[in-house]
């Protein structure tokens, strides 16, 4: 398995996602998405196909979220007002519309991948999703975009077994909650160790959860070894029909919200290895979704390296 260009790698996004402008800096969230979009508009990514993501019909959120919680998120907010779900998860007037397009992007990408229209997709969306639980917002997240799409893949799109690999400085507790009790769902998380969740002894009801907490100041060498020894063999044994990636870029050494020491080249390595797993195990079916990453000076390069790895734009594993 070498670096072969994937000509039908698609990007799913929508300008409405820029309307999620939470405090304390309303400009930060849209700037963050624009940094990623600009990085993937570079000449080297000329083969990328761009798709405008549809809004998800609110009733489809019931696959993952309670009706009461959906109604609360969708409740209108006047311009200039805000609603606190938690101290760090704040909705504003544009949040509900943005959240529907974020969920719709991942759902649409998954539908196209499962239908064989495309092989792989990367979704540039906001708000993020991997901390959201069935009836709870948290960690900047409202709807769990990736868990929702994975469940839809099983219930509506013909997938029997679904796997999520979550690499982010912060544990994907929300996604774990949707996978815990299901033998045909695998959840793997590489994250910075925390006293809150994501402990190695949390293994799911069917040994279907693999948490890989990384000690503070862990670098790319540590991450790569952990992935090779703990994550990859589990994915290979599970044999998913589609591979989902919660792609967080806040493990970078310059990110303000973590103490890990990954470098840009480590994200390329992840892209290469996850692409190889998808190609070997599930006919190339892969859907990746933007989660964390908060240093705008390095975020674009990290995402570009990851997507280049998936597309096979680099030779060999650096």
Image (spheres, grey):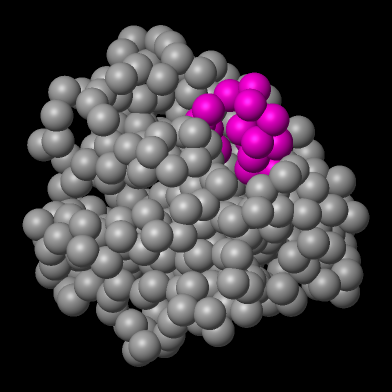
Q: Quadrant of residue 98?
A: top right
Q: Quadrant of residue 91?
A: bottom right
From the top left corner, tell me how far across and down residue 46 is, in percent.
41, 10
Q: Which residues are magenta?
A: 106-124
Whether 220 is among the magenta residues is: no
Frontmost residue, 303 versus 28: 303
Give the total number of marks visible in the rendering.
0
From the top left corner, tell me how far across and down residue 42 is, in percent.
35, 16
In this view, 239 is above or below 105: below
Frontmost residue, 175 versus 216: 175
Whether 121 is among the magenta residues is: yes
Identified at 15% across, 60% down, the residue is 225
Identified at 37% across, 54% down, the residue is 236
From the top left corner, tell me how far across and down residue 75 is, in percent.
86, 62
From the top left corner, tell me how far across and down residue 176 is, in percent.
54, 73
Relative to 177, 307 lies left or right: left
In this view, 34 is above or below 41: below
């Amino acid at each position: 398995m070498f670096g072969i260009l994937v000509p039908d790698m698609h990007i799913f996004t929508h300008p409405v996602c820029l309307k999620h402008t939470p405090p304390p800096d309303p400009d930060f969230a849209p700037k963050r998405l624009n940094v990623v979009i600009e990085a993937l508009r570079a000449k080297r990514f000329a083969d990328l196909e761009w798709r405008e993501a549809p809004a998800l019909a609110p009733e489809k959120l019931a696959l993952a979220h309670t009706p009461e919680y959906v109604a609360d998120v969708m409740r209108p907010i006047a311009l200039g007002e805000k609603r606190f779900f938690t101290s760090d998860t704040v909705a504003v007037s544009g949040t509900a519309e943005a959240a529907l397009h974020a969920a719709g992007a991942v759902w649409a990408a998954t539908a196209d991948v499962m239908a064989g229209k495309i092989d792989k997709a990367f979704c540039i969306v906001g708000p993020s999703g991997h901390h959201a639980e069935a009836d709870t917002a948290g960690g900047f997240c409202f709807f769990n975009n990736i868990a929702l799409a994975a469940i839809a893949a099983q219930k509506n799109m013909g997938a029997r077994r679904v796997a999520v690999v979550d690499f982010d400085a912060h544990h994907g507790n929300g996604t774990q909650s949707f996978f815990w009790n299901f033998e045909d769902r695998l959840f793997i998380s590489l994250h910075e160790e925390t006293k809150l969740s994501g402990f190695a002894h949390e293994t799911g009801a069917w040994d279907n959860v693999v948490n890989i907490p990384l000690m503070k100041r862990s670098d790319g060498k540590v991450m790569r070894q952990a992935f090779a020894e703990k994550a990859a063999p589990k994915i290979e044994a599970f044999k998913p029909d589609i591979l989902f990636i919660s792609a967080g870029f806040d493990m970078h050494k310059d990110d303000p919200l973590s103490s890990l020491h990954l470098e840009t080249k480590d994200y390329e390595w992840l892209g290469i290895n996850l692409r190889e797993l998808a190609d070997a195990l599930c006919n190339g079916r892969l859907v990746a979704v933007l989660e964390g990453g908060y240093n705008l000076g390095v975020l674009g390069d990290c995402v570009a390296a990851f997507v280049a790895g998936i597309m096979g734009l680099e030779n060999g594993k650096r």
